[in-house]
């Protein structure tokens, strides 16, 4: 694959992964516009490396904040660990139940791999973008119109177990649907159930760091399975030549991710969160138009 295309995909992934606008939707659209096959093993390897790059960007950006908030005391770490466990458990339960429901109702005669590929279709991405756009827009306007004269509470920046649970549930809804932004939906959910926006952002990306390696391992297992199947049919896949270029993509996604996080934090602090929702609504129309034109 040409280096320029890898760099462009890395920038798209790095920006869209950490902004609440759905990286999967943007990467799939970019791949189609570039004439690439999103389901090819080489693209799977590249996306795993790009996800890894953005994960390191999250760690680099939030580490000092997490250390002060989650690791400053044994009590604080225990509370954080409990919240993460609860949210992640709910994510797994909701995500797996939703996936099984979709498999049994809509795609009960389709192989599992085919079901996973269907979620990258633009006709499914467009409504998911629209749905998350509505959620982000409502959360942003609700936050914007909060009574600024409300009395200060010392626990205002502390996440409750209930708030963490709701963020976990919504993260589970985001798992099977390309276009339903994980960060956008979880941060918005936290804001709507009463969490401070900075607190919701901090916890959302802590969940992402834990979830990304799991997703990457699942993708790598799928990649290895495809590679073995291809070798058995006499058409082996050469992945070795893709590793170096994928590492280059990881570096660019790391840099783009850091820039995206700075942008995201500044818009949260300045009360412009709802504009990300407007963007997703417009993007859903664009994606549907692309689908209507044969992409």
Image: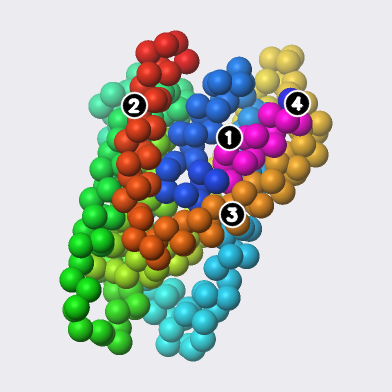
Q: Which residues are magenta?
A: 2-14
Quadrant location of the N terminus in the rendered image: top right
Q: Alpha-carbon neighbours of circle 2 within 10 Å: few (<14), some, or many (≥20)?
A: some
Real-space Cα separation, disc 4 to disc 3, in angstroms: 24 Å
Front: mark 1 or 3: 3
Q: Position of residue 205 (x, y in %)?
A: 47, 60
Position of residue 68 in the picture relative to residue 96 (left or right): right
Residue under pointer 3: 259
Can residue 115 be seen by looking at this rendering? no
Position of residue 4 in the picture relative to residue 128 (left or right): right
Q: Alpha-carbon neighbours of circle 3 within 10 Å: few (<14), some, or many (≥20)?
A: some
Q: Secondary structure at mark 2?
A: helix
Real-space Cα separation, disc 4 to disc 1, in angstroms: 24 Å
Residue under pointer 4: 2
Name the one closer to the observer, 121 or 16. Answer: 16
Residue under pointer 1: 222
Q: Alpha-carbon neighbours of circle 1 within 10 Å: few (<14), some, or many (≥20)?
A: some
Q: Quadrant of residue 41?
A: top right
């Amino acid at each position: 694959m040409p280096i320029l295309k890898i760099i462009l995909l890395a920038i798209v992934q790095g920006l869209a992964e950490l902004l609440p606008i759905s990286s999967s939707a943007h990467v799939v659209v970019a791949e189609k516009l570039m004439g690439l096959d999103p389901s090819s093993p080489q693209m799977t390897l590249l996306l795993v490396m790009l996800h890894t790059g953005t994960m390191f960007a999250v760690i680099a950006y939030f580490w000092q904040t997490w250390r002060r908030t989650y690791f400053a005391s044994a009590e604080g770490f225990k509370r954080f660990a409990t919240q993460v466990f609860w949210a992640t458990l709910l994510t797994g339960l909701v995500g797996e139940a939703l996936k099984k429901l979709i498999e049994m109702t809509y795609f009960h005669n389709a192989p599992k791999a085919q079901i996973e590929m269907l979620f990258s279709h633009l006709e499914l991405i467009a409504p998911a973008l629209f749905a998350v756009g509505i959620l982000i827009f409502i959360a942003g306007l609700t936050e914007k119109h909060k009574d600024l004269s409300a009395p200060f509470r010392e626990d205002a920046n502390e996440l409750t177990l209930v708030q963490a649970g709701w963020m976990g549930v919504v993260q589970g809804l985001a798992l099977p649907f390309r276009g339903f932004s994980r960060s956008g939906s979880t941060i918005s959910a936290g804001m709507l159930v009463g969490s401070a926006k900075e607190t919701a952002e901090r916890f959302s990306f802590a969940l992402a760091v834990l979830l990304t390696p799991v997703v990457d391992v699942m993708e790598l297992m799928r990649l290895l399975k495809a590679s073995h199947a291809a070798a058995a049919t006499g058409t082996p896949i050469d992945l070795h030549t893709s590793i170096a270029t994928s590492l280059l993509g990881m570096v660019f996604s790391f840099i783009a991710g850091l820039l995206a996080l700075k942008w995201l934090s500044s818009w949260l602090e300045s009360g412009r969160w709802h504009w990300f929702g407007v963007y997703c609504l417009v993007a859903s129309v664009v994606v549907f138009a692309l689908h209507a034109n044969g992409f």
